[in-house]
Amino acid sequence: KARLIVSVLGCSLVLAVQGFYSASDDVVELNPSNFNREVIQSDSLWLIEFYAPWCGHCQNLTPDWKKAATALKGIVKVGAIDADQHKSLGGQYGVRGFPTIKIFGANKNKPEDYQGGRSSQAIVEGAMNALRSLVKERLSGKSGGSDYSRQQSGGGSKKDVVELTDDNFDKMVLDSGDVWLVEFFAPWCGHCKNLEPEWAAAASAVKEQTKGKVHLGAVDATVHQGLASRYGIRGFPTIKIFRKGEEPEDYQGGRSRSDIIARAMDLFSDNAPPPELLEILSEDILKKTCEDYQLCVIAVLPHILDTGAAGRNGYLEVMMKMAEKYKKKMWGWLWTEAGAQMDLEASLGIGGFGYPAMAAINARKMKFALLRGSFSETGIHEFLRDLSVGRGSTATVGGGALPKINTVEPWDGKDGELPVEDEYDLSDVDLDDDFERDEL
C-alpha cells in the first residue's frame, strides 16, 4: 500500500507529523495501542477529534478543544487522534475529512457524529446534551454503561455477515464488482468461535462505512466442501480476500475487529473513485479545496479557442488519470482557463509561462511548486512524486494569501466561438431621405 513519505526538509511542501496536544493538556492523545483500553472499555462518554497536523481548520480548533477539555474534566473525556498518522483508526470510524468530531456514548462501536459549532462553548454544550441522553438511557434501563462485554459476545450483529454457500457463492462474490472478505470456518473450531463476534462487529462497521461496497461473508466449510476444496482450505478459520478480476488472496492481518475493519477500509480506498476534478468557478471552490486538503493541484489550461473541446478534454483526461493514481494522498484537484483567473496566475507566476501550466499549493504554508516538465502523465507523475517525498523547489504564494477569485460560468463542454461584433441591417435605413435632408 502506498504510504505518504513525510519529509522534514525545510523546502518541503509536506508538513512533518506533529501532535497538537501535550501531556500538560486535558486532551487525551489516543492511538491504536491505547484506544481499546481508554475508550472502548470505558464507561465514560468520550468526545474525540480526528485531526491531521497539516489541516488549517484543525489548528484553528485546537485552543477551543483544549478549553472544552478543561471545562469538562472529570465529567466527559475529551480525546484527539492524529488520523493522518494513525490511518487505521480514522478508517475504522469512516473519517473522510478533518477535523471530524465523534461522540462515543453507550455503544462505543457506533459513535455519533458531532454536528455542533466549533467554539469551546458549543463543544461543552454538545457534550452535556450527549451526557444527558446517556444518563436518561441508563435510567430507563436501555444501557448498562459500557457495551463492551455485550459487543464481545456478538451483540446480535451477525445479521451483517453474509452466509455463503456452494449455490450462491459465484453469483454473490465472483460476479459482483465489490470487495469481499470471506471466512471459511468449521462449527467445532475454537478459534472460529473466538473470531465470530469480531467478524460480526466488523461486518456491521464495514457495511456502514463503505456504504455496502465491502462485504464480509462466511462459509461453513464442513457443509460446503466444494468451495473449501476449490480454494484449498486446509485449516480453520481461513480468511480470503476476493476482488473482481483478481485471484483471491490470503488475509494476513490480525483477528480483532479493528484489524479486520482497517484492512477492509484499505481495500475500500484501493477501489474508491478518484477525487473530483473541479473547475474554479468561485472563491468558495478554491478555498474549500485548498484549505481542506494537504495540497491542491491546479492546472491552468489554454483558452478554448486555442485547443477546442477535444484538446481541452485531452488535458482534463491526463489530470483525471493522475488524480486516480494519487487518490490516497488526500489532495484536491482544480483547473481553470487561461485568463479567467488573472490574480491566481499572477500569484503563482504562471502568466507568461505558457499553457497548459500546473502548480501545487500548500495553503497552510502558503507555498507552491510549479510543474517544470511536460503536461503529460510522465511529466506530472514525476512532479507529484517529487513533491510527495519533499523534493523540488518551492516559492511563496504571491501576496502570502490565496488570491482573489472571479466568479465565472462553467465550461459548457463545447468548442469556443469568437465574439460576434454588432451588425446593422442597412435595409431598414432610407438612405435617400437622409441625403436629401443634408443637402445644402
Image (cartoon, rainbow, N blue to C red):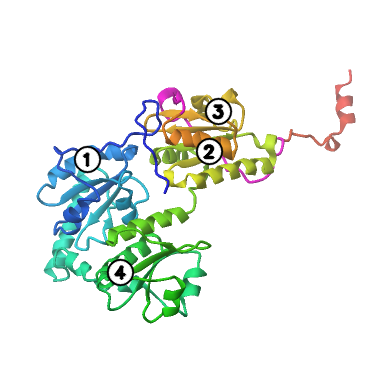
Residues at badges 1 and 3 in contact (C-beta under 8 Å)? no
Residue at mark 3 to residue at mark 4: CA–CA distance: 51 Å
Q: Which mark is residue 64?
A: 1
Q: Earlier in the sequence, mark 1 or mark 3?
A: 1
Q: Which mark is residue 381?
A: 2
Which residue position holds label 3?
A: 372
- State the image coordinates of residue 208 (x, y, percent, origin top left): 36, 63
Q: Residues within 10 Å of mark 2 (few under 14, many from 20)?
A: some
- Of circles 2 and 1, which is in front? 2
Report helix, strand or loop for mark 1.
helix
Placement of the C terminus among the 4 image quadrants: top right
Residue at mark 1 to residue at mark 3: CA–CA distance: 42 Å
The residue at 33%/34% (across/down) is 16
The residue at 34%/66% (across/down) is 203
Residue 137 in the figure: left or right of residue 438:
left
- State the image coordinates of residue 365 (x, y, percent, origin top left): 37, 29
Q: Is residue 377 magenta?
A: no
